[in-house]
Amino acid sequence: MSRLQQSLQRLQETSAQATARLEEELEVRRQHINRLESKLERQRDYDDLKREISVLRSVDLSQIPTGEPGKSLEHLLMERFKALQQAENLKPSNTPDALGKWTNDLFYLKIVTYKDI
């Protein structure tokens, strides 16, 4: 009987140690998940910012007629946006979009000043 009790006690100790080790591992993984969720939250708007930067980089400012040197980027972008809007308004509704991706991208474009870039 004593041998069975010793065996049972060893089994309980081993089980308690395994449980403690698994709980520690679980806590480490929970902390890792929390760090990853925090990182994801900080990068949530990454895709929007990436798209906006892509649009800004694709703007061909050389096509914008500038009567005055030294116009701000914000002013140049506003002029380009207005020109594209006017072209969109003049385009017949049953023809393909002559402006391509401009009309969709500029709809979402947030105008920023030159110092914000």
Image (tube, grey):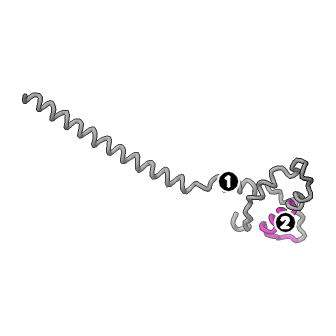
- Give SS at disc 2: helix
- Give SS at disc 1: helix
Q: Position of residue 7 (x, y in %)?
A: 15, 30
Is disc 2 surrounded by few (<14), some (14 to 19) or many (20+) residues within 10 Å? some
Is disc 1 surrounded by few (<14), some (14 to 19) or many (20+) residues within 10 Å? few
Magenta span of residues = 68-84
Q: How many marks?
A: 2
The residue at 73%/58% (across/down) is 108
Q: Residue 102 carries which label?
A: none
Question: Magenta span has 17?
Answer: no
Q: Where is residue 92 in the image (x, y as percent from the top left)?
A: 92, 53
Q: Residue 79 carries which label?
A: 2
Q: Does residue 109 lie above or below 25 as drawn? A: below
Question: Magenta span has 80?
Answer: yes
Mark 2 residue type = Glu
Q: Where is residue 14 in the image (x, y as percent from the top left)?
A: 22, 35
Q: Where is residue 96 in the image (x, y as percent from the top left)?
A: 88, 47
The residue at 55%/57% (across/down) is 42
Most frequent secondary structure within the magenta stretch: helix
**Distance CA(mark 2)–CA(mark 1):** 23 Å
Mark 1 residue type = Lys
User: Mark 1 = which residue?
Assistant: 50
